[in-house]
Amino acid sequence: MSNPYKTRKGGATVTVFAPYDCGNHCPFCINKGEYSDTSWFDQDKIEESIKLMDSITPECDFVFTGGEPLADRRNLQKMIDLIPGTHRLFINTTLPVFDGQSKEDLIEFTEHNKDKLTCINISRHMQHYVTETPDSYLAELKCPVRVNCVLYKDYPAERLPEYLDRWVGFGIPVQFRFDYTATTPENLYDREHDPILADLNKIADYTGLDGCRMRCGFHFDYKGLELTYHKTLPYSTIVETDPEDGITYDILYDIVVKQNGEIRSDWNEYVLDIEAYKNVKYEPYDLHIIEGDLEHTTF
Ligand code: SF4
């Protein structure tokens, strides 16, 4: 660690990489390589790390990602059971069904965890990168659900209305995502040269913008459906000098628990200094509404 830590009130989001692979090969995926060899994975260590992070920041957000968290829902359940209801809890998944996991099993899983699950974010891209279960399955889940769709390189813009009409009938909000490996501080809030923003403005009504140092969301209404265009930087530490105390801090947004349980302070290889994090300085969360009336939308 080069600087003392600072983070937002409640603590940085803790993203846990589930120790199970997905069966997909999305071209923009930077995690897939880590799942080619599972011999270093360690669920027991991950569970220890979840408990540790809960003890340091008992109100932080937890996110399970992968790989595929729902490739082994029984072991996922063990990890969820370690997370008290003081946290918001998200799962990023493709909602897989396979021998040994039916639609009914997934519905039962969400019913069982409905008081804990803040939202399940389900990947459904315009190009078919992931194996998809029927859209109707998403609507049957017993917790809030959102669809995530990466608009990658030459996405078929002319098919955006057709894609969105898929979800209007189910009332499932959609989050379009810019390829975050291409996001920079310069283009994060850039409206003039953003082709995705231009495409969305043609088909949906802009309702507002929220954002912080690290990420932003342009909000739209499409036939009554909540639609967000999300951009985030490829790293999650901002180095900044506090004008009040003159100290330069590493401001942490995302803490990452790797498949072997190692806790990192960012998406890179930096290991979190646990003792330093126990003494982290808190600041108010800088994510705020910049434009529009977004009080009722989901950030
Ligand atoms: S489904 Fe997720 S983890 Fe799997 S290849 Fe696609 S982006 Fe990567």
Image: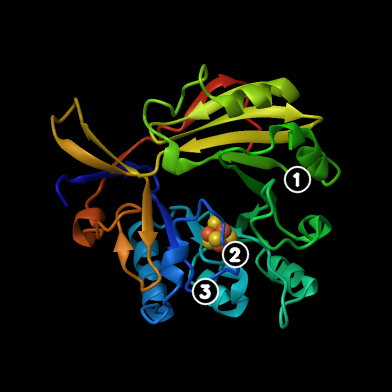
What residue lies at 68% left-to-right and 68% top-to-bottom?
A: 96
Where does the image place residue 205, in percent across and percent down from the top left? 72, 22
Question: Looking at the picture, how far across and down is residue 175, in whole percent?
Answer: 63, 41
The residue at which mark 3 appears reads as 20
Q: Mark 2 points at which residue?
A: 24
Q: Is residue 145 left or right of residue 236?
A: right
Tell me the number on the disc at residue 95: none
Quadrant observed for ligand 1 in the rendered image: bottom right
Callout 1, which amino acid? Answer: Ile
Single out the residue that lies furthest toward the right: 169
Can you say whether 42 is above or below 236 in the image?
Answer: below
Whole-percent x and y of residue 212?
42, 31
Tell me if the residue at label 2 has its CB under 8 Å from ligand 1. Answer: yes
| Image quarter of the C terminus | top right
Q: Nearer the viewer, residue 170 or 4?
A: 170
Question: Looking at numbered disc 3 in the image, what kind of residue is underneath it?
Answer: Tyr
Q: Earlier in the sequence, mark 3 or mark 1?
A: 3
Q: At x 63% / y 29%, what residue is drawn?
A: 219
> What residue would you read off at disc 1?
172
How far from the left and from the top, in percent, is residue 157?
Answer: 69, 33
Using residue 173 as the reference point, say whether residue 178 is left or right of it.
left
Q: What residue type is labelled 2?
A: Asn
Q: How many marks?
A: 3
